[in-house]
Amino acid sequence: MIKRTLFNKKKPDDISTRDKSGFFVANKKTSTIMSKRKNNMLSVLNADDEVIEAIYNTRKMTNDVIFTKKQFTETLLKRVNLKCKNQKQKEFIKTIDENEITICIGDSGVGKSYLSVAKALDLLRDSKNGYEKIYIITPIIESEESIGYLRGDLDMKTFPYLYSLYYLMDRIIGEETRKKLVENKIIEPLYMSYMRGINICDSVLIGDETQNLTIKGIKTLLTRIGYNSKFILSGDLNQIDRFKNPEESGLKYAYDNLQGIAGIGFVEFGKEDIVRNPIISPILDRFK
């Protein structure tokens, strides 16, 4: 029972300070417990069981303004605009709905990443699905020029590689909402270097640019799936940056060799499915 209070208007008199993400937490009774934490800035979503239970017990005192984690997510994700532009995109969404793992390949501009993100957010939004988090993962591979050493912690170093997914989320739900979900680890990046031993349950995982995963890497990723989870993996086999031989791509290996396994669906987009801009199709033809 993870809790956080949320007020859209004026702060009630009996509510304590804002936490770092701008949401009011607890009330005077709970403030005593909170004051034991650094700077009285407790992030309730990450609190220990004792504090969570204490906050939960103040529900009547705060007129039912304490939200469960699922309610918190639903409040932020009031609506996700998920519209398909052609029959193949509808097939992609249907495949995600009907399978635990969806593996998708296709050219640039067909909407693979956009639909993956929009569908994941839509699944997270509806608490009936039981999904608590979205994990995002992409290979840390530079396509052409190296940008050299990056300062900061792990999240700062990997942000440029995850930017395209965050950009799509910002378009769909807005930057402020996305940042709140990331800050509270409802949307969280994963890294292939630290995947072993992880069991992903009650979550949706988006794997982007997975054409650059090794065969061993995609095996490790796929075998992390636990109960009540969906994995959506996509990539463009014409944009492999890591291997000279396309047969070494983990995405290609998975697409070719996992067919027929119950619970795994496959979708292949073609040039005729490009929706970004019609000029992309003839450009791709000239580069072949």
Image: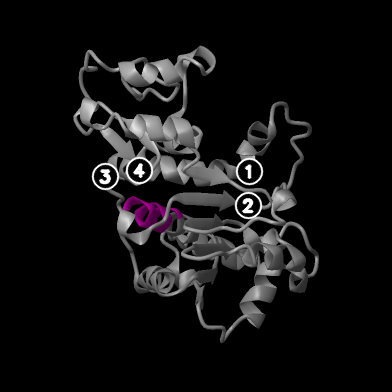
Q: How many numbered callouts?
A: 4
Q: 251 above or below 127?
A: below
| 63 or 135, nearer to the observer | 63
- Say what amino acid the circle numbered 1 marks: Tyr
Q: Quadrant of the N terminus?
A: top left
* Residue span colored magenta: 117-126
Label 1 element class = helix
Q: Name the residue under label 4.
A: 73
Expressed as whole percent of the image width and height from the top left, the position of residue 168 reads 45, 46
Q: Name the residue under label 2.
A: 138
Real-space Cα separation, disc 1 to disc 2, in angstroms: 7 Å
Question: Is 223 displayed left or right of 274 in the figure?
Answer: right
Seen at 65% across and 55% down, the residue is 198
The residue furthest right is 244
- Quarter of the rendering containing residue 157: top right
Real-space Cα separation, disc 4 to disc 2, in angstroms: 24 Å
- Say what amino acid the circle numbered 2 marks: Thr
Q: Mark 1 points at which residue?
A: 161
| 109 or 229, nearer to the observer | 229
Expressed as whole percent of the image width and height from the top left, the position of residue 93 reads 39, 68
Which of label 4 and label 3 is nearer to you?
4
| 231 or 162, nearer to the observer | 231
Expressed as whole percent of the image width and height from the top left, the position of residue 23 reads 35, 25
Q: 286 above or below 125?
A: below
